Each structure stands twice: as C-alpha cells, then as structure tokens.
C-alpha cells in the first residue's frame, strides 16, 4: 500500500462487517455499502459525486486518502440535491454513515 495504516484509520469507527460492493447508490462511482448504514466511495482525483439512493446515509465526511485526515463533514440532500463536493487534485474517500 502506498499509504500504510490510512484505511485502518478511516474504517476504525465504521460498521463494516456486512459491507458489499455497490454500483447503484452513486452515479458513475462504485463503492462499498450497507443499506441505511454505510457508503464508502474512493475518488482517485477528488471531485464530486451524486448520491442517487435513499439507502445511502445522508451524513458524510470526506477524508484525504493519503493521510486519513477529514477535509469536511456535512449532509447531502437526496433526492433534491445528492451532490457531495471534495477537493480536486488528490485522492479522497467519502464516507456516508449515520454517525459521522
């Protein structure tokens, strides 16, 4: 791994026992999810995603994938506006979870 320990730091407080690959909760991005509890999406160059499912929790945090640091926290407004913005130019991880 290019960034040892970062995934452990990001996933430390997340419910991950039942995660499964997901292609349906965001447009054009794959992730890992647990319906109603968790969605994790990796963006290699940052940017934005659009959440398109009620199964993705509304609360989110955006991590720098190189360090695990949190850039921002918020809540998307699916179905009215499910966009989540992240800093462009570097890898980011979006975590939608009920307890961010």
Image (cartoon, rainbow, N blue to C red):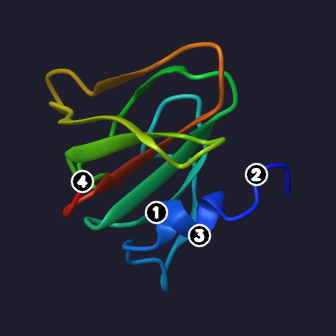
Mark 1 vs 4: CB contact within 8 A: no
Query: 82 left or right of 24?
Result: left
Which one is nearer the viewer's eye here, 74 or 2?
Answer: 2
Q: Distance between the residues labelled 3 and 4?
A: 21 Å
Helix, strand or loop at mark 3? helix
The alpha-carbon separation of the residues under discs 3 and 1 comes to 17 Å
Q: Position of residue 35 (x, y in %)?
A: 33, 67
Spatial distance from mark 1 to mark 2, Cα to Cα? 22 Å
Foreground residue, 20 or 89?
89
Q: Name the residue carrying label 3.
A: 8
| Element type at mark 2 | loop
- Say few, some or many: other residues with alpha carbon within 10 Å of mark 4 (under 14 / 14 to 19 / 20 or more): many
- In this rendered view, identify the residue nearer to me: 27 or 44: 44
Residue 63 location in percent, x, y?
Answer: 47, 41
Mark 1 to mark 4 CA distance (whole Å): 10 Å
Proximity of marks 2 and 3: CB atoms separated by less than 8 Å: no
Q: In the orientation shown, which residue stands out farthest toward the right?
A: 1
The mark that comes first in sequence, 1 or 2, is 2
Q: Name the residue under label 2.
A: 3
Kindly state the secondary structure of the residue where label 1 is placed: strand
Q: In this figure, which residue is indicated by the disc labeled 1?
A: 33
N-terminal of the pair, mark 4 or mark 2, is 2
Residue depicted at x 42% and y 45%: 25
Residue with the mark numbered 4: 57
Label 3 crowd (10 A; few <14 / some 14-19 / many >=20): few
The C terminus: image quadrant: bottom left
Q: Which of marks 3 and 4 is nearer the N terminus?
A: 3
**How far apart, in angstroms, are the residues tagged by discs 4 and 2?**
27 Å
Residue drawn at the location 49% of the way across and 86% of the way down: 17
In the picture provided, is 95 more to the left or to the right than 6? left
- Tell me if label 3 and label 1 are in contact, CB under 8 Å: no
């Amino acid at each position: 791994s290019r960034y040892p320990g970062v995934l452990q730091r990001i996933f430390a407080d997340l419910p991950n026992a039942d995660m499964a690959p997901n292609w349906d909760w965001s447009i054009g991005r794959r992730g890992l999810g647990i319906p109603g509890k968790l969605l994790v999406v990796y963006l290699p160059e940052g940017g934005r995603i659009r959440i398109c499912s009620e199964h993705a929790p509304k609360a989110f945090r955006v991590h720098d994938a190189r360090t695990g640091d949190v850039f921002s926290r918020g809540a998307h407004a699916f179905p009215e506006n499910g966009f989540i913005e992240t800093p462009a130019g570097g890898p980011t991880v979006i975590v939608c979870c009920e307890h961010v």
